[in-house]
Amino acid sequence: MSSINLPNLLSFLRVFLAPLVMVFLTMKINMDVPFLDNIGLKVGYGDLLAGLVFIIAALTDTADGYIARKKGIVTNLGKFIDPLADKILVVAALISLVELQRLPAWIVVIIISRDFVVTGVRMVASAEGIVIAASRLGKVKTVSQIIAICMMIFNIPGSLYAMLIALVLTVWSGVEYLFRGKNVIFASPGKAKP
């Protein structure tokens, strides 16, 4: 089976869209978009472009997983690039929001640290021949982060509260992965049990 397929191409597209989100989000365009200004949202043209690109990129994540499962074209490249693309997109947006002083840096540090911990647990498990699959809570965490990031990009009131909810779900899902991987982490090499 070829690794060059539509789901993997969509994941690569997400990687390439992430820098565009950063560029548009950090553009210094001080003009607000009139139709959004009329409904009380202070959104500049750079924010609007960044938000639209971010939403398109997030939708490719849903599309690539659906297509891969429906067509039965799951590949090792897809297993590698899909979660990596998700992280690149989210981290790019979060770092830009910190630069714009819309988001405290400590929140981003916790989110990134959780991803490092989960990736480490999964790598150790993989070396032992054990697969720790993505959990439902991990998927809810991703959706909550995307919603909170969109709210922050579009300056929607309550966006910081949405990000704090996403942060709680992020930490909670990280603890869940640690719990699921505890037998791998604390076992001697070659003696881990799923």
Image (cartoon, rainbow, N blue to C red):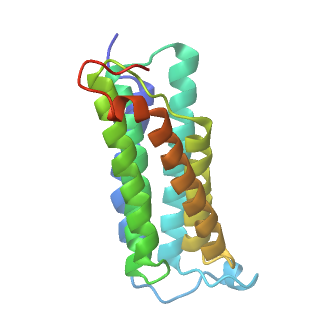
Please report the residue visible at 52 percent of the width from the left and 55 percent of the height from the top. 171
- Residue 60 visible? The answer is yes
Residue 131 location (% of width, % of height): 41, 23
Please report the residue visible at 59 percent of the width from the left and 80 percent of the height from the top. 43
Along the horizontal axis of the image, is 3 left or right of 94? Answer: left
Q: Considering depth in this image, is 68 or 121 the residue closer to the camera? A: 121
Quadrant in which the N terminus appears: top left
Please report the residue visible at 51 percent of the width from the left and 33 percent of the height from the top. 134
Residue 138 location (% of width, % of height): 55, 43
Considering every residue shown, the one lying at the far left of the view is 189
Q: Is residue 104 above or below residue 193?
A: below
Name which quarter of the figure residue 79 lies in: top left
Residue 93 location (% of width, % of height): 43, 64
Along the horizontal axis of the image, is 71 left or right of 84? Answer: right
Tally of numbered discs: 0
Considering every residue shown, the one lying at the far top of the view is 1
Please report the residue visible at 61 percent of the width from the left and 78 percent of the height from the top. 155
Q: Considering depth in this image, is 14 or 149 the residue closer to the camera? A: 149
- Residue 12 visible? The answer is no
Q: Is residue 131 above or below residue 27?
A: above
Quadrant in which the C terminus appears: top left
Considering every residue shown, the one lying at the far right of the view is 39
Along the horizontal axis of the image, is 52 left or right of 41? Answer: left
